[in-house]
Image: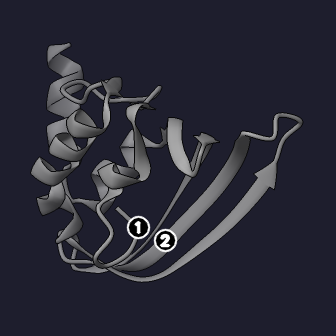
């Protein structure tokens, strides 16, 4: 979502890469396996991106004792068309990179905060009530 204009998020993954959402709300997959699956899912979900005018992205990358793994703190901010005002959203990623491609990405985003930024809090409440 914050990769930038002209960057296809799914293209950053290895052919057998895995993207996980450990805190996924109901209706959202917890795991996507394979570059094509990741690309397809994020392409279909691109309408969410159009709800945000991202004005800035702050990122801190922290190394680990495993040279393939980094922990990334990402915060983006700007204007949400969905709520008609400013927003700020923070997430944490644990990323394993091999041969210049993402092999595994665990995306720890706050589903309540994201629903709020996208103006979908009631949808989340309904999904949680039905679950």
- Kindly tell me whether residue 122 is visible in this rendering: no
In the picture, the quarter occupied by the N terminus is bottom left
Q: CA distance from mark 2 to mark 1?
A: 8 Å
Q: Is residue 81 above or below residue 103?
A: below
CB under 8 Å between discs 2 and 1: yes
Residue 2, image x and y in percent? Answer: 40, 67
Is label 2 or label 1 in front? 1
- Kindly tell me whether residue 22 is visible in this rendering: yes
Q: Residue at x 61, y 40 (%)?
A: 98
Q: Residue at x 15, y 53 (%)?
A: 43
In the picture, the quarter occupied by the C terminus is top left
Residue 34 found in image quarter: top left
99 relative to 1 in the view: left or right: right
Instruction: Report the label total.
Output: 2
Residue tagged 1:
2
- The tag on residue 76 is 2
Q: Nearer the viewer, residue 110 or 33?
A: 33
Q: Which of pointers 2 and 1 lies earlier in the amino acid sequence? A: 1
Q: Neighbour class for label 1 at 10 Å: few (<14), some, many (≥20)?
A: few
Residue 124, image x and y in percent? Answer: 22, 36
């Amino acid at each position: 979502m914050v990769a930038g204009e002209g960057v296809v998020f799914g293209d950053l993954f290895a052919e057998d890469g895995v993207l996980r959402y450990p805190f996924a709300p109901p209706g959202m997959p917890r795991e996507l396996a394979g570059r094509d699956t990741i690309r397809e899912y994020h392409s279909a979900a691109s309408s969410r991106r159009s709800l945000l005018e991202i004005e800035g992205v702050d990122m801190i990358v922290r190394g680990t004792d495993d040279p393939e793994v980094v922990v990334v703190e990402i915060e983006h901010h700007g204007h949400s068309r969905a709520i008609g005002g400013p927003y700020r959203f923070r997430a944490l990623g644990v990323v394993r990179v091999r041969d210049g491609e993402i092999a595994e990405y665990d995306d720890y985003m706050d589903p309540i905060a994201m629903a709020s930024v996208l103006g979908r809090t009631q949808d989340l409440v309904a999904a949680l009530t039905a679950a």
